[in-house]
Amino acid sequence: MDVAGTRGKLAHEAAALDEADALYGKRAAFALDEDTVYLDGNSLGALPVAVSARLAEVVGHEWGRLRIRAWDEAGWWASPERIGDRVGRLVGAAPGQVVVGDSTSVNVFKAVVAAVRMARERSADRDEILVDAATFPTDGYIAESAARLTGCRIRAVAAGAMTGEMGERTAVALVNHVDYRTGRLHDLPGVTASAHAAGALVVWDLCHSAGALPVGLDAHGVDFAVGCTYKYLNGGPGSPAYLYVRREHQPRFDSPLPGWNSHSEPFAMSPAYTPADGATRGRVGTPEVLSLLALDTALDVWDDVDLTAVRAKSLALTDFFLRCVEEYVPRGRVESVTPAAHAERGSQVGLRCPGAGAVMGELIRRGVVGDFRPPDVLRFGFTPLYTGFADVERAAGILAGVLGTPLL
Ligand SMILES: *Cc1c(COP(=O)(O)O)cnc(C)c1O
């Protein structure tokens, strides 16, 4: 079959897949343009339309009229824990273990230092922090500083090799659940179990998995987890991140940032610090109320969504994209860096391509928004709540057009 025939066939198949997609209706809950295929929801999720009116109400009524009373009457004060429970449902955490606030970077700091302190209680000579060798850079920078502060050393280990590298000196392993560049999904149950077998603790960074696939924090015995809310959870630019502290660890969670919001009686204004119980210990200072409440409304979209259905659609979308690319793009122009095996794939596809920066610029000009990660990766994120199969087919067709252009 010629390319035009293949395109017709795949476009037809895409239409049928969209027709049969139980999540297709969710797309209407998001602000999207008809003429653009948005494949960058793994960097900044699209706006859930209900957020605008809710924010106007929060600003106009709660801030504008209730003013200071809103901390109690509008529930502002307790919102980090309340919204934490909503995030918790999406990452397999029972209520009372997730608190929302601060950035992922800050939560990495809290979790890593607290984990080292806990590991040291068990055995004073644990002095090694293992860090995912391909980690998103901020985790590595923060872990490096946490190591200096706690007298540990850092060892970079490929996430796939972590299980064999934990020993009696290991205090904590800090691992990205999904690699931000390649989209590789790491073995959360396996790495967690091997950390525990070695007497170590594990901190998972869920930035690229929460909202894209089931995580199962409680089920797999994870100690600590962090993640952002502006990617697959669509909380908006700079929406606060979250921290999961497993319930059994909470009494010993010794935060390196014990701000007044984590005090058992914050309004007693006591000079002595007494930590609150539960997930509240993960709080630091005054919560980011406007962005927290934008996130709260963004999470409404998930209320009736089953993460297994999201995962199934995500894999179907990435499979379909890889197939369309294979059929349309001239051979040898791109090479997938994303694992073919479902068990090792997150919800994005990375394509290595010479001149990737310029290629992405042209794709965006033609209405396909992905992003570029140095040195040579075109990155496409697939958000099952609002990406359809016809979008995927169209994106691959436009990519083929760009790569067929001799100029690039
Ligand atoms: C996006 C992302 C972050 C972002 O960190 P912030 O402090 O929230 O800016 C951290 N880690 C990973 C793995 C990410 O993908």
Image (tube, rainbow, N blue to C red):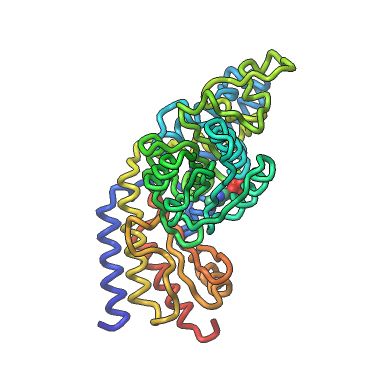
| Residue 237 visible within the image | no
Left or right: 251 in relation to 106:
left
Residue beneath the point at 60% across and 23% down: 77
The residue nearer to you, when weighing 73 against 128, is: 128
Residue beneath the point at 39% across and 50% down: 187
Q: Where is residue 79, by image quadrant?
A: top right
Note whether 81 is above or below 129 in the view shown. above
Residue beneath the point at 54% across and 20% down: 277
Q: Residue furthest top?
A: 268
Residue 62 at x, y percent in the picture = 61, 25
The residue nearer to you, when weighing 229 against 156, is: 156
Q: Residue furthest bottom?
A: 406
**Viewport quadrant of the N terminus:** bottom left
Q: Where is residue 107, by image quadrant?
A: top right
Query: So how many labels did they put on this image?
Result: 0
Residue 55 at x, y percent in the picture = 58, 35
Note whether 324 is above or below 95 in the view shown. below
Note whether 30 is above or below 299 in the view shown. below
**Viewport quadrant of the C terminus:** bottom right
| Residue 131 visible within the image | yes
Residue 319 at x, y percent in the picture = 33, 63
Residue 241 at x, y percent in the picture = 56, 40
Residue beneath the point at 61% across and 17% down: 264
The residue nearer to you, when weighing 313 against 281, is: 281
